[in-house]
Image: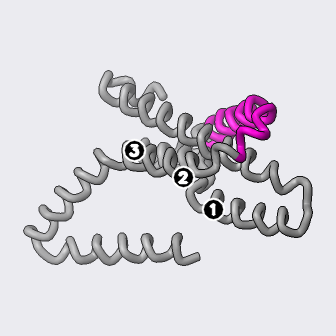
Amino acid sequence: MAPLIVPLIAAHLVQRWSTRSPQRQQAYERVRSMSDAAMIPLMCLLLALMCSAYTPAVLNQAQLIPRLAGLYLTYAILAGGTAWCLSKVMSRPERISVTFSAVTRNALIIYPVVALCAQRLAHNGNPEASLMGATVLTQTLTELLIMVAMTAIFRARTKTGNAEAL
């Protein structure tokens, strides 16, 4: 739980700190702007590094990857479309947040846990343990590609003035 709770508490404290003075607000806005610009490249790098450690094990289950990727892509389309339609009463930024939340499932947190569970199951002789890594790694990479595509689509629609058409 700490990987989820600590960043949330830190963000809350920093946002409260920034409202204390105009200088703090300016500093906060500069940092926020830089982090917004760096978020996707850093997340891509982190996921690529994380996934590269498990690639050899996953390649032993390569026949699963296309089926799993299709399943995750279908989930993303259905979940994203449903979230977008059900959030029509919200503002556009809120709708985007709801849609991203519905489509993404915190792969950065899930994968290390599943990898550890797979090691334990394999140690106990469970033959399905080898499938866990391929499953979650494929989900992680598919989710990453979907998030990059969604970000590009939302940004392009905003820049062309078609924001409301989404």
The question of residue 134 being in magenta is answered with no
Q: Is any atom of residue 42 visible in this view?
A: yes
Q: Is residue 88 left or right of residue 7?
A: right
Quadrant location of residue 116?
bottom right
Discs 3/1, front: 1
Taking depth in this image into account, of 123 and 42 the one nearest to the observer is 123
Are dots 2 and 3 in contact, CB under 8 Å?
A: no
Q: Residue at x 61, y 48 (%)?
A: 102
Taking depth in this image into account, of 8 and 107 the one nearest to the observer is 107
Q: Secondary structure at mark 1?
A: helix
Where residue 42 sits: x, y (%)? 38, 49
Q: Secondary structure at mark 3?
A: helix
Label of residue 50 in the image: 2
Three-letter residue code for mark 3: Ile
Q: Residues within 10 Å of mark 3 (few under 14, many from 20)?
A: some
Three-letter residue code for mark 2: Met
Where residue 92 sits: x, y (%)? 43, 42
The question of residue 62 being in magenta is answered with yes
> What secondary structure is the magenta-colored segment mainly?
helix
Magenta-highlighted residues: 57-83
Q: Is residue 96 left or right of residue 139?
A: left
Q: Secondary structure at mark 2?
A: helix
Are dots 3 and 1 in contact, CB under 8 Å?
A: no
Q: Residue at x 67, y 44 (%)?
A: 56
Q: Is residue 43 above or below residue 71?
A: below
* Distance from Cα at disc 2 to Cα at disc 1: 9 Å
Q: Residue at x 42, y 30 (%)?
A: 152
Three-letter residue code for mark 1: Pro
Label of residue 112 in the image: 1
Quadrant location of residue 69?
top right
Residue to which mark 3 is pinned = 40
Tell me which label, 2 or 1, sits earlier in the chain: 2
